[in-house]
Image (cartoon, helix red, strand yellow):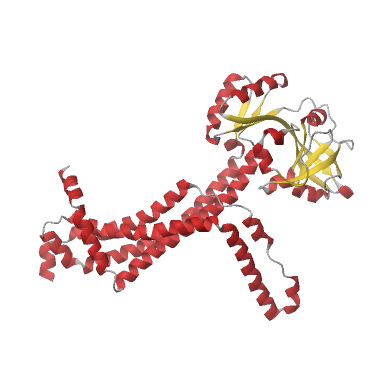
Amino acid sequence: MKDKGRFFNSLGWIFFVSRRFSLVDKKGRSRVNSILASLGICFGVMTLITVISVMNGFQMSFIDSIMEISSYHLRVSGMEREAATEFQMKCLENPEIRSASPFMEAQSLMIGKNGRQSAALIRAIPSDLTQIDEGFKREANIWSGDFNLSESGSIVLGTELARKLGVRPGNTVTLFALSGGNDVNLISTERVFKVRGIFRSGYGDINASYAFINLEDGFKYFGKDSPLLYGIKLYDTNSDSKTALQLENQFEGIKCESWKEFNRSFFGTLKIEKNMLFMLVLIIFLVVAVNIFNGMRRRVYERREEISVLMAFGGRKHEVQSIFMMQGFLTGVKGAIPGLILGLLLSVKMSGIFMIMSKIVYYVQLFALKLFSPENAVFLRENPMYRIYANIPPRIFLGEVFFITLFGIFAALFASAAASREVLNLTVSEVMRDE
């Protein structure tokens, strides 16, 4: 306790000496090394924040579409149709549950215009789902027509599925082959539906395979043996286990499947991808930390005389070491704070940056074609992928931003602490004798 009290009392002269050393180091090679170290941390923090925010935007566009349209937060199976009304009332009374809606689904081979065919997942949902479920309405963006399932025989298709079938609103499609109960025909040309709308989500697989009909048509065409499922959405996605346990205790025979279990492989892949990118970009900090370590070791060697004088006047080795650690800490702060600001600005303006990149790439390619193949220059077009990327907003998570900024600061601090350990091995008599 005495040592701690003495250390805090000595912070005043530690700050003073560290500031004096920094003023002297503003000249010559030490100044260049300090600037380069701060710039390295700055660009590392900026790059990592920008890359992670953009990746979050791409991943969350997938995740939001999957959870709002496909998997829900909880999928409830094993529900008896007679108990469906009571179950839904209990769900609406639960403060953890945002919405609960019944659905049925089956696999189908669809036939569209001119005999074009495609496999699809047909999901039967309440005709008013877009009115009671804001999340579904937000993610299933109408591309053409209306999301109107009020009339029997209506269907809404994903954009890619509609393209494969060659249909648009007003055309008809046939559910030629349809999986279902034992009381329905597997093959039939009588299941004809009119396309009311075409939707587009943030996940390509949904656009390429999903089609929606109303629940009454589901009961009619899927058969009596087809199970009635419930999709439940929560206010807090992390309360899935708790809510699932509550529902299973209230209703015997039902099974609740969490979104984490239903999409385990997909979300696991996304997590690994993000972690690998995180590790690759963190190498920037390791390179900067090595440079700080080498620069600080040189400073310690150059300041052996000052160190011996400080020790001779009563400065302890750990206190003298703190002077150099303070310099490393300030180097980290000078780099991390501007990097944080630049990273946030780039993330917010990423849509415009993608459009600028699109123009740059286009004009560079145009210039090259004008030089080497002018006859092909008229066929050049801007890459549409940049516009798609620009329409996906980055997602900034404060926890990740805070961690990245702290990592940049403490990378410099730990490098300085490791380099200044040589102070602990110096003695006043040895330094004075050598000098």
| Residue drawn at point x = 47 percent, y = 47 percent | 398
Q: Is residue 407 above or below residue 260?
A: below
Residue 225 point in image, percent of width and height: 77, 25
Q: Residue at x 10, y 69 (%)?
A: 433
> Residue drawn 15% across and 55% down?
316
- Residue 264, picture quadrant: top right
Q: Quadrant of the N terminus?
A: top left
Residue for point 66% across, 42% down: 138
Depth check: give the residue in front, 92 or 54.
Answer: 92
Q: Position of residue 186 (x, y in %)?
A: 83, 34
Where is residue 184? Give x, y as percent.
84, 29
For residue 352, side relative to residue 289 (left or right): right
The image shows a total of numbered marks equal to 0
| Residue 418 image offset from top left, x and y in percent | 28, 57
| Residue 282 seen | no
> Looking at the image, which residue sits at the far bottom?
371
Please indicate, yes or no, whether residue 329 appears anywhere in the rendered image: yes
**Figure quadrant of the C terminus:** bottom left
- Image side of residue 178 versus residue 86, left or right: right
Residue 88: quadrant of the picture: top right
Closest to the observer, 135 or 56: 135
- Residue 38 vs residue 187, the one in the foreground: 38
Q: Is residue 420 left or right of residue 181?
A: left
Which image quadrant for residue 301? bottom left
Work out whether 342 lies above or below 126. below
Above-or-below relation of 41 to 216: below
